[in-house]
Amino acid sequence: MLEAFSWFVTGVAHGCLGLVFDKSVVVKHDSNPEELKLVSLDTVITESLLMIDRAIEISDASSFEIPPEWIGGQVMTNIELFELANSYAARILACSSRTNHQNGEIDRNRVLQYARNGIDGDFEPVLGDAYGFYDFYWVYMCYPGWARVDMRIINLMDHDYPSRWPRDNISWNTPDGQDPGEADPDDARLLTDFEYLETNIYPPGRGYYNFSHYRHKRYDYVSEEFWYGSKPKPSFLSWEMKLLEAEALYRNGNVQGAADILNDPSGPRKVRGQLPDVDPQSDDVLRLILDEKDIECFGTGAGIQFFDMRRTDRLQPATLLHFPVPVTELELLDLPYYTIRAINDGVDGSRGNWTGYDEE
């Protein structure tokens, strides 16, 4: 149990470093602190998956039960840790590339195997002081008055709704040039998961791109008693595994199999979104998979939407693809300071862009 859990958390930690930073250190249980050095993000991702694979191997060959204090109140058997480890491996591998070209080189069969061995129920740790498990990504993004939902997300659920707030706060791309008000959704989740707010409270000097009429409310119940939450909250949805499976099938040429997952009558897209079936012959199945991930997985795993836009060249030009190592870490390692000056070259800055359904 100790070995499996240790390899799991160490692997996930390194995977997060590989997803966020341009380089990092790899720290194992027997590493010499005096010999640590920065290595490439590819090396970090590779090492993270080797660690998670070790956790998967031990969990598959053992029988144990993890105490609830270790993972936010979850009493996990070796089978459940096996599934959760596979899920994180699928997410890390699928999201690791920085460009669409690199994304095409990902081993989709490996992603598919991880995803099919992943969780079949949502992973919902209890937030708050009871187990010392917190989700400040969700708190800062969704707490009332602190953040808004990007307009492009609303546009996914109402294709006629503006995908951008006007840069001058005036020139809307609506037919009458006026503020659109509330959206008229095709996707029922816009009404259940998102809240319309008439006004914005943010300083215009910080940029109108911060403005939006919507906030995310799906998990408001988690913070009813404490602002940082005190109830179980999804951190990993089983639907994310199905969507990674659908994408892997699509990229391997099985468009029908990918569409079948989207059309699953028991899946959130049909049950919660109340959306029509996807036609594998005429619909852009890959885009619908990514749209579905943006909507349904909103507020669960930190960075999912950013990673997906990054690896499909949909970030706005010169957006940072990753961050430099924090200065405090450079000081600890006695390494020179550096930063990243992103340009639209596909190395450190995005060379792509994205278009909303209202601008096609």
Image (cartoon, rainbow, N blue to C red):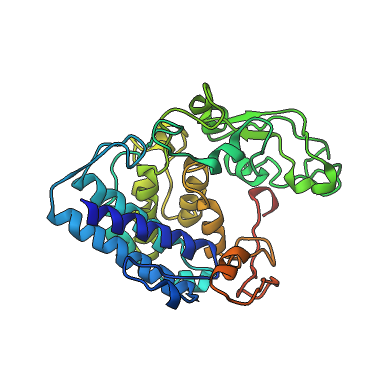
Q: Is residue 198 left or right of residue 346?
A: right
Which sits in the foreground, 281 or 45?
45
Residue at image x 57%, y 33%?
190
Residue 284 visible (yes or no): yes
Residue 249 picture quarter: bottom left
In the displayed orientation, state which residue is furthest to the front: 34
- Counting from the top left corner in percent of width and height, residue 14 is at 42, 62
Q: Is residue 320 left or right of residue 255?
A: right
Residue at image x 64%, y 40%?
149
Residue at image x 43%, y 39%?
133
Residue at image x 49%, y 50%?
288
User: The C terminus lies in which quarter of the figure?
Assistant: bottom right
Q: Is residue 117 left or right of residue 220?
A: left
Disc tally is 0
Which sits in the foreground, 15 or 238?
15
Q: Note whether 306 is above or below 144 in the view shown.
A: below
Which sits in the foreground, 89 or 129?
129
- Counting from the top left corner in percent of width and height, residue 9 is at 35, 54
- Counting from the top left corner in percent of width and height, residue 95 is at 46, 61
Residue 343 picture quarter: bottom right
Q: Note whether 253 is above or below 121 in the view shown.
A: below
Q: Is residue 18 left or right of residue 200?
A: left
Which sits in the foreground, 155 or 244?
244
Residue 252 visible (yes or no): no
